[in-house]
Amino acid sequence: MKEKINKLFSQQLEKINDPDLREKVVEIWTDAAKKAGWQPHELEKIPFTLLTQTKGINLIEHTIAVTEGAIGLATAMKENYKEMPFEINFDWLVAGGLLHDVGKLLEIEKTDGGKYQKSYQGKCARHPISGAILVAQAGLPEEIINIVACHAKEGEERPKRIETVLIHQADFAVFDPMVMLEKRLLII
Ligand SMILES: [Fe+2]
């Protein structure tokens, strides 16, 4: 499982400078996948959400898209603002992007019929909560806990780090069009 996760996220993991943080990101994903009973080959089949039709977009693709999207936004600000009003920590941003939906490994389960549904654990605690617990248990910085805990609706009106804001916006930028598509509000 660890090898598979390392391979899936290799390009993003390379962008984390702190080797300890890089290792912990992989460990958290590995432990969560094992705990939930996923097999390595199943990872790229898990839908990225149960809230709308995913049209084949899986959790791994979504995680990479959100992480890269947030890196793009952060880079655009850094390269174009003469004065940055705040500092962006790229290690936290990339680690937080890779971990923002790790709780979905616990929130989503496969039925005997091969479909996907919300797990009992997912009903008790949505992925931002279960993910934040995993991140906290691994001893990651508070700032990454903020990213995972507050990237979705749980973070509305809550204080956030800039890295959390960027992950949230990147997440909804790729999620909203899927909802709009289902509601026939996306012009295609
Ligand atoms: Fe997400």
Image: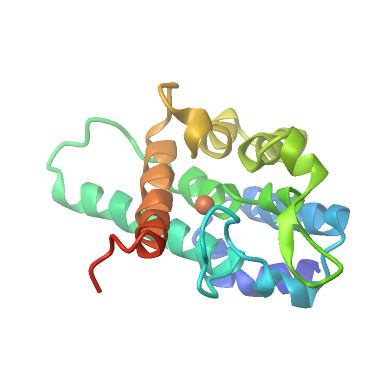
| Horizontal side of residue 77 vs 155, given as left or right | left
Q: Nearer the viewer, residue 20 or 34?
A: 34
Residue shown at 33% from the left, 35% from the top: 87
**Residue at horizontal 66 percent and vertical 35 percent from the top:** 132
- Farthest residue to the left: give it: 82
Q: Residue at x 56, y 50 (%)?
A: 95
Give the percent coordinates (x, y) of residue 181.
36, 64
Q: Quadrant of residue 187?
A: bottom left
The residue lying toward the viewer, choosing from 49 and 30, is 49
Q: Is residue 35 above or below residue 15?
A: above
On-image quarter of the N terminus: bottom right
Res 89 quadrant in image? top left
The extreme front residue here reads 184
Q: Is residue 94 left or right of residue 36?
A: left
Q: Image height check: is 121 above or below 63?
A: above
| Residue in the image at 87% along x and 68% along y | 112
Give the percent coordinates (x, y) of residue 159.
43, 21
Question: Where does the image place residue 9, in percent across and percent down from the top left?
Answer: 59, 68
Tell me residue 143's x, y (percent).
Answer: 53, 32
